[in-house]
């Protein structure tokens, strides 16, 4: 089987296991820290304190049965591999590190404006295959008329902000996910939280005072809610194990027959 590069080196794709496809570890812009680190009182970053906190949080992730996270902290958000290597030496977790650049301002994209379709068109017009594209944060939308056309191209739907209530409340996210599963789109869905152990932009901002990023919300709340509505384990494994492996390796595989049967069962239940 092929391998996937991680902070600790190549990992056999079969060993990736349950995977969260859109998370962060540290969001820490060096220029902000250097220039405004004391703007809200004492310096908001202590290296050893934050590393110890991350070891505890990601250790709990591993203990919960999650074996891999994809850290989407690209340049522009504070990508710093040596820090991740120090952390990963203390936590038995596969950390896949994203490449690219953060261009939210330059290439603003959000689900409410349906800009995922524009992004998809722009990328495919330059020769990128749809199955190599994830429309991140697609799960911020509950508009199936927006989500279906994305998935119908073969691109992936990033249902990856579970727990970020101000973009889309949790009950609505779950209802939309159930609808997508009922229509057979489970083979093109990534589940995640967009969580982090530390966000520098939370510091001193009352708008984020009640935010409690939780890498385990899907495990503890979302998956039980799906099971209550008839989603079977094969469908869950498809989203949490098979889909990440397929995307990270670029190697397709036949969907689990039990997952297809589960999709029909969810649709009937709805």
Image (spheres, rainbow, N blue to C red):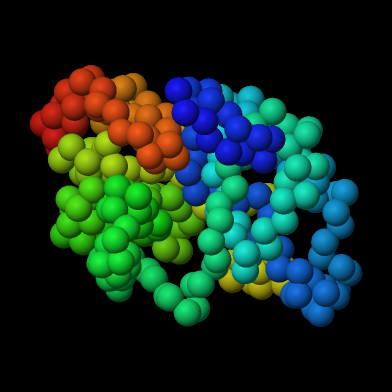
- Please identify the quadrant where the C terminus is shown: top left
Q: Left or right: where does residue 75 sit relative to residue 248?
A: right
Is residue 17 something one can see in this rendering? no
In the picture, the quarter occupied by the N terminus is top left
Q: Is residue 123 above or below residue 216?
A: below
Residue 25 versus residue 262 in the image, above or below: below
One can see residue 146 in this view: yes
In the foreground, 198 or 29: 29
Q: Nearer the viewer, residue 269 or 50?
A: 50
- Residue 103 position, x and y percent, is 51, 72
Judged left or right of residue 1, residue 121 is left
Q: Quadrant of residue 235?
A: top left
Please identify the quarter of the rendering in which residue 64 is found: top right
Taking the spot 69% from the left edge, 28% from the top edge, the residue there is 92
Q: Is residue 193 above or below residue 33?
A: above
Q: Is residue 236 left or right of residue 56?
A: left
Q: Position of residue 267 (x, y in %)?
A: 14, 35
- Residue 228 position, x and y percent, is 31, 28
């Amino acid at each position: 089987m092929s391998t996937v590069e991680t902070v600790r080196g190549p990992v056999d794709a079969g060993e990736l296991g349950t995977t969260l496809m859109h998370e962060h570890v540290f969001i820490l812009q060096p220029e902000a820290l250097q220039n405004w680190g004391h703007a809200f009182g004492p310096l908001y970053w202590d290296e050893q304190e934050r590393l110890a906190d991350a070891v505890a949080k990601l250790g709990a992730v591993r203990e919960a049965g999650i074996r891999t996270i994809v850290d989407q902290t690209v340049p522009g958000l504070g990508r710093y591999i040596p820090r991740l290597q120090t952390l990963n030496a203390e936590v038995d977790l596969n950390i896949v590190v994203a490449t690219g650049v953060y261009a939210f301002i330059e290439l603003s994209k959000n689900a409410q404006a349906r800009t995922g379709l524009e992004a998809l068109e722009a990328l495919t017009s330059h020769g990128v295959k749809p199955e190599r594209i994830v429309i991140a944060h697609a799960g911020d939308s509950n508009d199936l008329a927006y989500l279906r056309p994305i998935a119908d191209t073969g691109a992936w739907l990033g249902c990856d902000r579970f727990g970020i209530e101000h973009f889309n409340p949790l009950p609505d996210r779950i209802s939309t996910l159930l609808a997508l599963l009922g229509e057979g789109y489970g083979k093109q869905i990534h589940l995640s939280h967009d969580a982090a152990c530390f966000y520098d932009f939370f510091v001193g901002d009352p708008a984020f005072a009640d935010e409690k990023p939780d890498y385990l919300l899907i495990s503890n709340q979302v998956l039980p809610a799906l099971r209550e509505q008839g989603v079977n384990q094969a469908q869950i494994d498809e989203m949490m194990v098979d889909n990440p492996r397929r995307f990270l390796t670029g190697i397709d595989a036949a969907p689990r027959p039990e997952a297809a049967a589960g999709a029909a069962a969810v649709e009937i239940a709805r």
